[in-house]
Amino acid sequence: MPLKIRLKKQFNSFLLDVKIESESRRIGILGASGCGKSMTLRGIAGVQDVDEGYIEVNGKVLLDAAKKINIKPQKRHIGYLFQNYALFPTMSVEQNVMAGLHGGKEENRARTAAMLEKFQLKGLEKRLPGELSGGQQQRVALARIMAYQPDMILLDEPFSALDGFLSDRLQQELLEMLEDYEGTVILVSHNRDEIYRFSEELLIMQEGQMICQGKTKKMFADPQKKAAARLTGCKNITGVTLRDEHSFWIPEWGITVKSQTAIPTRTDCIGYRAHEFIPVWGERAENCIPFRLKSMAELPFERKYFLDIGNAPENKTQREEAGSEEICWFVQRDLWPELETRGLPDYLQIDIEKILYLTEN
């Protein structure tokens, strides 16, 4: 389903300037809290006015500010699943599902019954939202949306208020319930795992703007921009100076890294994921960082080691301005026996093939 969106809105101290073009059925928007993700969904749904805008869904123009076209929210055929599901608290499950339908009485009842069956809500028809679990409430909200067959569904951080176990289960349920939905679904979240699991295409948002876009798995494997690398979970990001086509200097880490393959000339910083380091005992090998342990956190299935950066400025303000951070090394449980037998390594080696070459902007 071709999708073209351009939204621009100046708030008091914030400019929302978003452009989306996609033919994917499952789109994820990833960004930190306050970057404008929910505001973008509100603009698409029509519940947030914009200064400039254009929205086209599958050839149908919903908004064209330049031509004074602005379809009312209830006429846009867009389903919007809010964070709190926005169910009517004094209406039963059946009444909530039926609330968005505009057909004849018998037609509405038949459609509602079909949705109650599809979303496993049979037997709960007369209950109020307050009498339901979080998962049941989500299914009611989705059944209400699907009952009127929208052209698009917008999911606004639907799992943010749930604990880890319930969130994981409901994510899987949602994927299964949307399997046969042919329209476009946009999920916004600050949780990279949710986005990775759900979306075919990923848009990364920062301070009101989309800074990059691409296929989700490719974006995680090669984010290209510093902000994108950080949002996709990269813990070790630092500035570099290119020495030549095959080497670069990392000032904060105090090492020169050499590569047999050519280094992209656009590179001004790199990212290195915390679980990719190779432990080295004994003599220093090429592309190694001295192991200077600062602190360690042990979790049920992972140990997190935090290393001092030898060449980083000691002053905290200087360190923040330089973009320096402690080096993170995360070790999965299956490697613990080796550490217990051999002790902590003397060095951590960088696997050249695992480096993320990044730009600041």
Image (cartoon, rainbow, N blue to C red):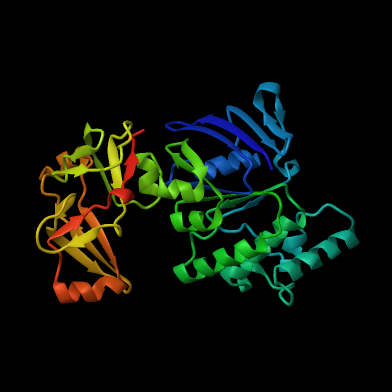
Q: Which quarter of the figure is the C terminus placed in?
A: top left
Instruction: Check the image and name the residue furthest to the front.
Output: 260
Residue 64 in view of the camera: yes
Relative to 55, does residue 108 appear above or below in the rendering? Answer: below
Q: Is residue 47 something one can see in this rendering?
A: no
Left or right, residue 5 beside residue 103? left
Q: Position of residue 332 (x, y in %)?
A: 31, 68
* Frontmost residue, 323 versus 208: 323
> Residue 48: which quarter of the image?
top right
Please report the residue visible at 27 percent of the width from the left and 52 percent of the height from the top. Answer: 351
Q: Is residue 92 above or below residue 26?
A: below
Q: Give above or below for 173 relative to 337.
A: above
The residue under the point 10% across, 49% down is 310
- Image quarter of the N terminus: top right
From the viewer's side, name the closer residue of 187 and 52. 187
| Residue drawn where x is 37% and y is 41% of the image | 227
* Image location (x, y in percent) of residue 49: 60, 34
Residue 163: x and y in percent read 46, 68
Residue depicted at 24% across the width and 56% down the height: 328
Q: Residue furthest top?
A: 66
Q: Position of residue 74 (x, y in %)?
A: 73, 44
Asked whether, in this view, residue 196 is left or right of residue 296, the answer is right
Question: How many discs appear?
Answer: 0
